[in-house]
Image: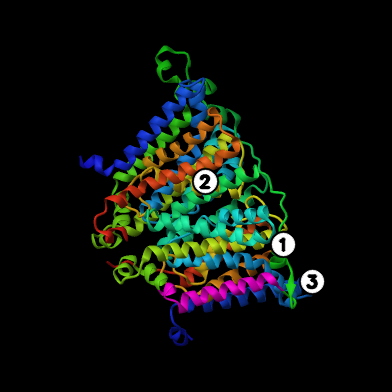
Amino acid sequence: MNMWRQNRAFVGALAMLAVLYITYNFMHPRGFSTAVLVQNANEVVAIAFVAMAQTLPVLLGGLDLSVGAVMTLTACVASVLVNGSPAEILFGMAATLAVGAAFGFMNGVIIVYGRLQPIIATLATGAVALGLALFIRPKPGGDVDGDLNWALTNSLWDLVDTYGLFDPDAAWFQPIAWIPVPLILLFGIAALVWVPFKKSVTGRTVYAIGSAEGAAYMSGLPIDRARIAAFTLGGFLASCGGLYLAIQTSSGNADVMQAGAYTLNSIAAVVLGGTSLLGGAGGAIGSLVGALILRVISFYFRIVSIDPLLQPLIEGLVLLAAVSLGAIRTLRVKNRLELFR
Amino acid sequence: MTKLFSHIKPENRPILIASAFILVILMVGTAFTLSTAGTAPLLSPGYVLQQLQIGSFLGIVAAGMMMVILLGHIDLSVPWTLTAAAMMATAVGGDMAVPTGLAVGLIVGLVNGLGVAYLRIPSMIFTLGVDSVMRGLMVAHTGGFAPQDQATPFMRFLAAEKVLGIPMAIFVWALVSVIITIVLTRTSFGRSIYATGIREGAAYLSGIRTRLVIIGAFMMSGVCAAIAGVLLAGYSAKAYQGMGTPYLLPAIAAVVLGGTRILGGQGRYVGTLVGVILIVLLNSVLSIMQMPEAGRQVIYGSVIIGMLLVYGRGTKVTA
């Protein structure tokens, strides 16, 4: 019962996603096919990673306005480095992720030791990240390894086939051969990075800071370390999004508007996924689900005949309606003072 | 020196440092132009007035944004409120153009205020939603193209003409500034904004109708964005898609650089004024130096961080 109460927002988001996506597949002429799943999976990866990155500052009770810019910066880095021999490709990928983590670390250090509000500090570092991205890629373009692009943006069958790992038509392989690689990457990193972090002392401290920073400090929790770790992990997750975007599009583009759009959508995804903007409650898996919901809504426009000019309006109204669901809480409040937190 | 410094009230310190930094930018820029071209355009009145004319759009947006930030909220719906006001004003045209634009701002502000004050949705996300709804409405209205409607002569007069050698836009900015200053320092509404920003629960128990205060502040922000939109449409002769987007983050930065606390409850309007001038001047010096966009962004971000590290630091957590 307690479990259910704590995760009500997350379970709601999950149910919403399931209903939306299953209905979508029923309405789609080629629904429930690998091709549709692969295409959809490719479109959700970048925003899902950025939304997970945004979750950490939000759990601390802040906001990171630089996640979209860090994603753009790392995509530009990847578009330069991820090509050549297999060793060079691996080095390029590692370097891209390191740039993202380093940028997040820098955010954390500025916020902790500079004692600045995250929202305003990251507003400024976001501009710095975009500037660096423009240095690396003054014009859109790039050269990402073609095999890698094909292998990572299709189903497992294509991954095995591209690199000739083993016979992709082997009987034992068929039950899982249809799974899209992007989804494996997304859920794999969520499971291997986020879940252990959440269970660690540092991760728990992040939640404690978001609930009551003073109490966390008095309990002897390592609040400075947790803050810096949270921003570093945020930078790392944003760079996962950037790396994937670069591999998917085979290019990098220092697009200011795109960076802003990703940042704002990530906030919406975090809220949809049940993380409180006040901090201390929620999680990156929820944000992942929130990002999926945002994208699935936009998928509908392809199969439902709506005037394309009305699409942005409907997207906006759906977003506004979804966040307004949080207002139900105010109807249950008996003491009006509780509203003013 | 430090003794002298400590006599200054904490809320005035950011304003003084930002002003000093403006002088530094002016000196660096002038030194640069003197050494390369042998002239000092930054010190000529004509150039300064032209920069202030361009800066007036940002200044008016920042003035409205400050009302909301003083409450500890934020208004992310500014970009498309500004654009919608400009598009509606040019679409209606005639004598009703400017009132229509301002009405758009008032309505958006009212919706924002209702959502934040009554539905209790964090302003960050609610205004973001309102922004995308406004964008959707404008895409549906214009068909996704730049609207062909021209700005009315009165809008052009307000934004681009000069009176007594001074651009009208600066007079509009000055008028907005005077009104905001009076509201903040001389009215009970202004006092209520500060009180609500410090602790809403305490303000409520003291008999302040905090919900109305929040709605009022958001409506002021909406109207300010609308004024800026109408002026900008007059200045460029027409409205266009995404015209408000470049104003959101600089407006927030200007308010914060001027010493307004991002968590609300503290800040003087003079500071916002100084913050706007600082950002406008920084941009113009960088463009005089023909700094590429990449370097501009890096310097812009570093300056904000650097200045905040000097005076924007919070208190250490102790309990």
**Sooner in the amino-acid sequence: mark 3 or mark 1:** 3
Q: Give a yes or no on whether discs 3 and 2 share a subunit.
A: no
Checking the image for residue B290, the label placed there is 1
Mark 2 belongs to which subunit? A
Q: Give the x, y percent position of residue A202.
A: 31, 51
Q: Amino acid at mark 3?
A: Ala
Q: Is residue A258 above or below residue A31?
A: below
Checking the image for residue A309, the label placed there is none
Mark 3 belongs to which subunit? B
Checking the image for residue B37, the label placed there is 3
Q: Is residue A141 left or right of residue A164?
A: right
Residue linked to disc 2: A262
Q: Amino acid at mark 2?
A: Tyr
Q: Give the x, y percent position of residue A220.
A: 25, 60
Tell me the CA gap for discs 2 and 1: 29 Å
Tell me the CA gap for discs 3 and 1: 13 Å
Could you tell me which secondary element the residue under label 3 belongs to? loop
